[in-house]
Structure formats: structure tokens, C-alpha cells
Image (cartoon, grey):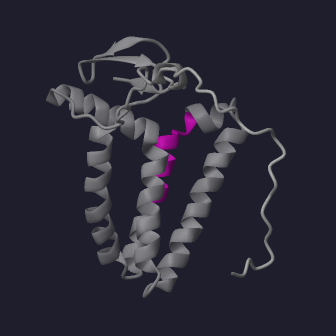
């Protein structure tokens, strides 16, 4: 029988003794995992008021991620046929990003933060983007993207439980006792 260039290793340790060792119980060798708690980040709120509060809180906390999700869907939808609309979308995204960077670069500017409302400027830029997409005949793609993304975003913001509680508290949004574990996650 061929061994294909391999050789058996000669054991260097002494032979095990033939006497029978005492049997140890399994409990000494097994670590008990009784402190494992399964974390599920989704939960249905009990009342409509709790649902509205959770949706508003999650839209505020995760709004950037929801916007990015919508933007990626719109970007993918525009790739095959509407190159000009895609270029306009990218340019307007850069304009909005530069405006947000200017806001962060000058946090104490009275003109940028008090006189000019950031919500007004961002709404105006989004409105201009939508108008330009409609003018370049990508309005149907925008409507399809809205029809796909908005229900997904609303369902996610309804079901997502905030995972950043800083202390043990009773969550009034879902009427459950929530506490923070050692790793910072919420345990229900």
C-alpha cells in the first residue's frame, strides 16, 4: 500500500497506564450555559400610540440608513435606461453631502444653524432632485422606487426595537422589561 510520501509519527509520550482511572462526572467538564438570552431586535408594539412613537423614533435614529436604502434602490433602477437621470441624481447627492459637511464644519455658525433652517434647505434640494428626475423622464422609476421602499421602511421602523438603552428600564413603547446585557444589547 502506498503512503504517498507520508510517514507515521512515532509517539514520544509514555504509554498510558493500564489501570482504570476514576470516572469524573460530566458536570465537571461541561460549562453550563444558563445565562444565554436570545435577542430579537423585532417586536410588535401593543398600541397604535406606541407604534407611532416607535416609527417616529426609528425614522429619526435610522433616517440616514433609510435614505441610503432608498437611494441605492433608485440608483439601481436608473442604471439600465436613464443615464442622464443617474448623473443628475449623483450630482444632487454630492450637493446635499457638501451642504451637510458645511453644516458639520461650522457647528457654531448662526447663519447656517439659526437663520437658514436645515430642514428647509434639504427639502428644497430633494424637491429640485425630484423635479429634475421627472423632467428627464425618470418619474415613473421614482414612483416605483417609492412604492417599493416606503412600505419596507415603514414596516422596519415599526418593528425595530431600539438597542441602545443606557440603563435598566421598562420600555413604554412595547410594554416589556428591557435591560442592557454585558455586551450592550437589550435583553427582553
Q: Residue furthest front?
A: 18
Q: Nearer the viewer, residue 161 or 108?
A: 161
Quarter of the figure with residue 158: top left
Q: Position of residue 159 (x, y in %)?
A: 28, 39
Q: Where is residue 126 in the image (x, y as percent from the top left)?
A: 45, 58
Residue found 65% across the figure and 33% down from its top: 18
- Residue 100 shown in magenta: no
Residue found 39% across the figure and 26% down from its top: 37
Image quadrant occupied by the N terminus: bottom right
Residue found 51% across the figure and 48% down from its top: 121
Q: Where is residue 187 in the image (x, y as percent from the top left)?
A: 39, 23
Q: Where is residue 15 in the image (x, y as percent from the top left)?
A: 75, 39
Residue found 51% across the figure and 24% down from its top: 31
Q: Which of 120 and 36 is in front in this view?
A: 36
In the picture, measured across the screen, residue 78 lies left or right of residue 21, that is: left
In the picture, measured across the screen, residue 12 lies left or right of residue 60, that is: right
> What is the span of residues highlighted in magenta in the rendered image?
115-126
The majority secondary structure of the magenta stretch comes to helix
Quarter of the figure with residue 116: top right
In the picture, measured across the screen, residue 143 lies left or right of residue 162, that is: left
Q: Nearer the viewer, residue 79 or 92?
A: 79
In the picture, measured across the screen, residue 82 lies left or right of residue 42, that is: right
Amino acid at each position: 500500500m502506498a503512503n504517498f510520501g507520508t510517514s507515521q509519527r512515532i509517539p514520544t509520550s509514555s504509554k498510558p497506564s493500564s489501570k482504570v482511572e476514576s470516572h469524573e462526572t460530566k458536570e465537571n467538564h461541561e460549562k453550563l450555559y444558563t445565562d444565554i438570552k436570545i435577542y430579537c431586535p423585532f417586536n410588535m408594539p401593543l398600541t397604535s400610540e406606541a407604534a407611532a412613537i416607535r416609527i417616529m423614533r426609528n425614522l429619526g435614529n435610522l433616517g440616514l440608513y433609510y435614505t441610503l436604502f432608498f437611494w441605492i434602490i433608485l440608483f439601481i433602477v436608473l442604471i439600465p435606461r436613464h443615464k442622464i437621470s443617474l448623473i443628475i441624481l449623483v450630482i444632487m447627492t454630492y450637493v446635499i453631502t457638501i451642504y451637510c459637511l458645511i453644516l458639520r464644519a461650522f457647528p457654531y455658525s448662526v447663519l447656517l444653524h439659526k437663520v437658514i433652517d436645515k430642514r428647509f434647505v434639504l427639502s428644497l434640494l430633494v424637491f429640485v432632485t425630484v423635479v429634475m428626475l421627472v423632467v428627464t423622464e425618470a418619474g415613473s422609476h421614482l414612483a416605483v422606487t417609492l412604492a417599493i421602499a416606503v412600505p419596507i421602511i415603514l414596516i422596519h421602523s415599526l418593528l425595530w426595537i431600539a438597542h441602545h438603552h443606557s440603563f435598566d428600564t421598562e420600555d413604554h413603547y412595547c410594554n416589556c422589561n428591557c435591560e442592557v446585557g454585558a455586551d450592550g444589547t437589550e435583553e427582553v
